[in-house]
Image (cartoon, rainbow, N blue to C red):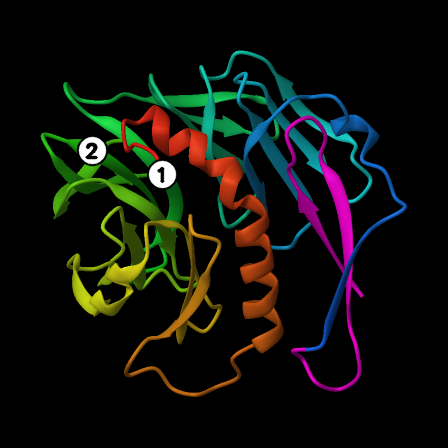
Amino acid sequence: MASSVCLPVMDCRWFEWNFLGKKVHNLALKSSEKKLTTLEGVGLQTALAFNAEGSTLATGGEDGHLRVFKWPSMEIILDQTDVHTTVRDLDFSSDAKSLVSLGNSGPCRVWDLTSSKVEVNLPREDGEVFGFCKFGRNADNTQLLYITAMHGGHGKIITWNTESWKRVGAKRIIRGAISAFDVSTDGKLLAIGTVGGDILVLTSSNMRSAEDDQESALWKCHCCSVLSQDSRFLISASFDNTARVTPIEGKKKNGLSVRLIIFVILLAIMALHQHKRGYESLGLGSF
């Protein structure tokens, strides 16, 4: 049995799902009797993230309220109002000591979860509109922070050094907005979805295409993209209530977790419509 969290309009709900028999595609998903009382009546939550170990949960609301809890005890670590106008994206550092939060306006904030205070504010340059934020790492295992931005009609990826908190790189990737973004577990690949429906997988060291899938352009838009733990597959969902698994060429077949893929697809579909408001606030329109 496993658990997942869904973010309806007013309350967060706890769901449980079981594998029925030995076939991994036989799933039963049901609402749990357990209640997330600390997240009842909090309004629409537009961002959710777990740390790598699944021991800490962060949620961000349409009202700009940021909450961080120990999971599953729901003991409060951080409770801060008016962090952003609306919280758009959240991500934990690999050691879970820092949390990055991003809104639909203003700077990106990095939180020190030990002190529960803002460690640094990362400003936008003139004309930039931030989209997504993800921690990653380079070849020597040094931690980096990636932020996507819309700037001058192009979607770009900005790289930040997490020791000096200075920009160390920025590159235009596509014409138009980036509508989904993820970083592989090993930090070697970056995956993006576009409002036109395309999927691009980039090598993080040079920001060049490692894989692309233009057949997905038949989709309305990608709203969620997640790379599998071994970077062999990209799981993505779109606003037309469909999900897709795209293989990444050249990866060794060493233990893909099919259960992980199914789990991520379920979460993506659950979160699908909650993220839609965030895209519309960036002027991406209705899909």
Q: Which residues are magenta?
A: 1-25
**Closer to us: 165 or 80:** 80
Q: Residue at x 37, y 55 (%)?
A: 183
Q: Amino acid at mark 2?
A: Met
Q: Nearer the viewer, residue 73 or 63?
A: 63
Between 268 and 201, the one lying in front of the other is 268
* Mark 1 or mark 2, earlier in chain: 1
* Rendering coords of residue 222 (x, y %): 35, 51
Residue at 61% x, 30% y is 114
Residue 116 as seen in the image, left or right of residue 282? right
Quadrant occupied by the C terminus: top left
The disc placed on residue 144 is: none
Residue at label 2? 150
In the image, is residue 208 above or below residue 153? below
Give coordinates of residue 124: x percent, y percent: 24, 22
Q: Which residue is mark 1?
A: 132
Mark 1 residue element = strand
**Is 192 situated above or below 228?**
above
Disc 2 residue crowd, few under 14, some 14–19, many 20+, Cα 10 Å = many
